[in-house]
Image (spheres, coloured by chain):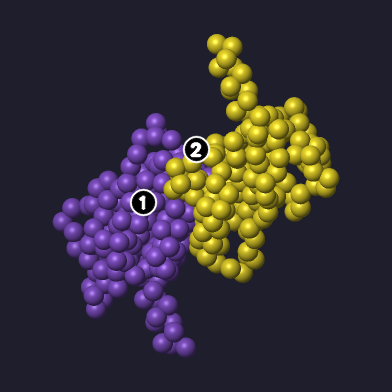
Chain colours: A yellow, B purple
Amino acid sequence: MRILGIDPGTLHMGYGLIDDVNGVISMVECGVLSLPKTVPLEKRLHRFYVELLDIIGSFHPEEVAVEEPFVALNVRSALAIGRAQAIAILAAAGNNLPIFRYSPTQVKQQVTNYGRSSKAQVETMVKLQLGLSVLPQPSDAADALAIAICHLQQRRLNSLISKIR
Amino acid sequence: MRILGIDPGTLHMGYGLIDDVNGVISMVECGVLSLPKTVPLEKRLHRFYVELLDIIGSFHPEEVAVEEPFVALNVRSALAIGRAQAIAILAAAGNNLPIFRYSPTQVKQQVTNYGRSSKAQVETMVKLQLGLSVLPQPSDAADALAIAICHLQQRRLNSLISKIR
């Protein structure tokens, strides 16, 4: 099972791909799409969309997970995250890939077992769980990997629950 | 000059096409893309995107105008409008069409000459300016036509200003 995690932003869009082979998870690739603020919004959104399609076409994830802000800081950031999220959703939907949305609290809960963990704790757990010697940089890429791991844990949980029932 | 106006929403997306021929404006087409809330967000966004591409492909607008919330009511609606707006921006950008964003106040100002006019006043002016016997229905379609008219007025204003300079 290969999962693509996306940390949506209209200036920086983090992405991270992980594999789950018989319960052993590993990092496939991660990075950040970035464009300066001087590039018009429509060009940034379109470029990110094309690059996400390219990532999906190159790495063939089976499912996509994207961060969903539960309570955004303010209206302006909610508008920006909404725009970036739509691009990610569209890239997945256009490839018939299931897409799942997780709040920051869900990501923290699934990755560190604690919904209020710090950014540093999440990053440490991402590094440990993926067996990496150093933390993926920049932080948007690490965040995207955390979202992918969150989805994988949620899948395992759902699978366990369905077996119990 | 043919303009496509879009009133972005993730459940209802209004669209309106107007023509400006030697200063005489007329309505070409208008309508609303709608999907029930029971359809998952990713399917709604993808369907709206495909339908907007279809509208652009059928009517060949030269420029696109979309509403930009200046102060959205709340974070949840900002997130939704951001998503819907991104779909409209992407459909325009993918066709190399210039896209312009206008706040509700700008739309009111350009269409009725008064930034705080009521919804009914805007609708009446849309009807008058397009020489229609009845108001376009539903209101999302009328709103999209208002956004297209706003862009046309702004273009005329810019053209006048550039001549004065």
Q: Position of residue B116 (x, y in %)?
A: 43, 56
Label 2 sits on what residue type? Pro
Q: Residues within 10 Å of mark 2 (few under 14, many from 20)?
A: few
In the image, what residue occupies the spot 60% across and 49% down?
A: A8
Q: Chain of mark 2?
A: A
Q: Which mark is residue B50?
A: 1
Q: Chain of mark 1?
A: B
Does residue B164 appear anywhere in the picture?
yes
In the image, what residue occupies the spot 79% across and 43% down?
A: A132
Nearest the eye: B1 or A104: A104
Q: Which mark is residue A98?
A: 2
Query: Could you tell whether A88 is left or right of B110 in the image?
Result: right
Label 1 sits on what residue type? Val
Can you say whether A117 is above or below A160 in the image? Answer: below
Q: Which mark is residue B163?
A: none
Secondary structure category for the residue under label 2: loop
Q: Position of residue B92 (x, y in %)?
A: 41, 62
Query: Could you tell whether B16 is left or right of B11 in the image?
Result: left
Viewer-side label of 2, 1? 2
Q: Residues within 10 Å of mark 1 (few under 14, many from 20)?
A: some
Nearest the eye: B36 or B131: B36
Q: Position of residue B165 (x, y in %)?
A: 47, 88
In the image, what residue occupies the spot 80% across and 47% down?
A: A135
Locate residue B4: give its quadrant.
bottom left
Q: How many marks?
A: 2
Can you say whether A19 is above or below B109 in the image? Answer: above
Query: Could you tell whether A82 is left or right of B131 in the image?
Result: right
Does residue B67 appear anywhere in the picture?
no
In the image, what residue occupies the spot 64% across and 45% down?
A: A17
Q: Position of residue A129 (x, y in %)?
A: 76, 35
Can you say whether B115 is above or below A99 in the image? Answer: below
